[in-house]
Image (cartoon, helix red, strand yellow):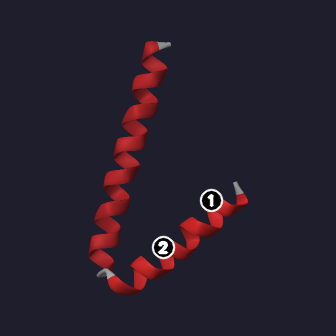
Amino acid sequence: MVAADGLAIAVGRVLGKRLPERAVKIGASVAFFIFGALLIAEGVRG
């Protein structure tokens, strides 16, 4: 878990330097929506 978090932080730093801030915000919004929808669907199924 710690290694995965470290990798995610490193990738985030690299992408943060290379991508425009707007692209990062849109990507984060899409990811948040997708994971939220999946969790809601899982909860509805039981």
Placement of 45 over or under 11, stated as above or below: above
Say the numbered circle drawn on residue 21. none
Q: Under tag 2, what secondary structure?
A: helix
Check if mark 2's residue and mark 1's residue have beta carbons within 8 Å. no
> Which residue is found at the position 57% from the left and 71% from the top?
9
> Which residue is found at the position 32% from the left and 62% from the top?
27
The image quadrant of residue 6 is: bottom right
Answer few, some or many: residues within 10 Å of disc 2's Cα (few below 14, many 20 plus, some between 14 and 19). Answer: few
Type of amino acid at the residue the image marks with label 1: Ala
Residue 31 at x, y = what percent?
37, 52
Residue 24 at x, y = what percent?
34, 71
Placement of 18 over or under 46, stated as above or below: below
The image quadrant of residue 7 is: bottom right
> Which residue is found at the position 34% from the left and 68% from the top?
25
**Which residue does the numbered mark 1 point to in the structure image?**
4
Say the numbered circle drawn on residue 12. 2
- Going by the image, does 22 lie left or right of 28? left
Type of amino acid at the residue the image marks with label 2: Gly
- Measured in 3D between alpha carbons, the distance from the residue under mark 2 to the one under mark 1, in whole angstroms, is 12 Å
> Which residue is found at the position 43% from the left and 28% from the top?
40
Answer few, some or many: residues within 10 Å of disc 1's Cα (few below 14, many 20 plus, some between 14 and 19). Answer: few
Q: Under tag 1, what secondary structure?
A: helix
Q: Nearer the viewer, mark 2 or mark 1?
A: 1
Q: Quadrant of the N terminus?
A: bottom right
Point out the tag, 2 or 1, that comes first from the N-terminus: 1
Residue 14 at x, y = what percent?
45, 81
Residue found at the very far top of the displayed protein: 46
Instruction: Please state the total of marks drawn on the protein image.
Output: 2
Residue 19 at x, y = what percent?
31, 80
